[in-house]
Each structure stands twice: as C-alpha cells, then as structure tokens.
Amino acid sequence: MGVSWRVVQYLIQEGHEAIHIREEGLHRLPNGKIFDKAYAEKRIVLTFDLDFGEIIALSGGSIISVIIFRLHNTRASHVIDRLSRVLKDSRQVIEEGAIVVVEELRHRVRRLPFKQEGE
C-alpha cells in the first residue's frame, strides 16, 4: 500500500515472492480487505498507511506481519535501504508475525499475538 514498484522489484531480486496490489488491480480495495487477502495468502503487508496497525490490533489474533513506514524521505531508494536493514535485523520475528514500524533511524518490532494485561 503506497509502496513503490521499485521496492517490490528489490524484494523479488532478493528472492522474496512479492506482489504489488496494483498488479492485481486491487489498489482501490479497502484496507480491511487487503489485510484479509494478505492473511489468506500468508503475505506480509508493506505500507505507509497507519490504519494497518489498528486493523491488526483489532483482528482477533490473526498472525500476519505488517511493516509500516513512517519516513520523511519516501523515495524508493531510501525505503529499500531502510527495509533491507529491517529484514537483516528482524527477519525471524517478521516471519512469525509482527508489526514493524520503520522510522528514519530505527525500527520498532512488536510481536504478535499481542499479550493482554495479566497474561
């Protein structure tokens, strides 16, 4: 969602099975439906849309990973640079289910499912 084709091309070159939502003509699909599709296909969502953090929090424990970019510099080359660092540092956690918030100088990882207070 909102991620450049160049980022998808980078992922494919790195050996990942990646698609851009526009490839399937689904770029106008509501976020909740995109989430459902990603869950059904066991995909990771890469997005600039903060709504996905809330969608995953309200998903009832669906295990899927979402990488949310909160970058001032949204040029594809910078996004790829930050994404490569995230994948290097957090690949295992992402494969297990997490929300990753990618900022200019750091990234934060929150494992799924979320623990409720008292658990």
Image (cartoon, rainbow, N blue to C red):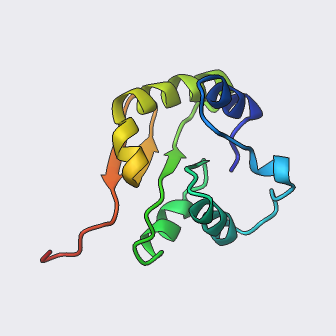
Task: Give the vertical position of 25 relative to 73 (above or below).
Answer: below
Q: Residue at x 76, y 51 (%)?
A: 21
Residue 75 in sight in this render = no
Task: Give the vertical position of 15 relative to 108 (above or below).
Answer: above
Picture coordinates of residue 18 (x, y %)? 66, 40
Q: Residue at x 49, y 25 (%)?
A: 84
Q: Residue at x 51, y 43 (%)?
A: 70
Identify the image quadrant of residue 9.
top right
Picture coordinates of residue 11 (x, y %)? 62, 30
Identify the image quadrant of residue 42.
bottom right
Task: Give the vertical position of 68 relative to 90 (above or below).
Answer: below
Please count the marks in the image.
0
Residue 104 in sight in this render = yes
Task: Give the vertical position of 65 relative to 113 (above or below).
Answer: above
Q: Which residue occupies the foreground of this view, 26 or 13?
A: 13
Question: Of all residues shown, which one is farthest toward the right?
Answer: 25
Picture coordinates of residue 44 (x, y %)? 55, 50
Q: Residue at x 82, y 62 (%)?
A: 28
Picture coordinates of residue 119 (x, y %)? 14, 74
Q: Is residue 90 left or right of residue 81?
A: left
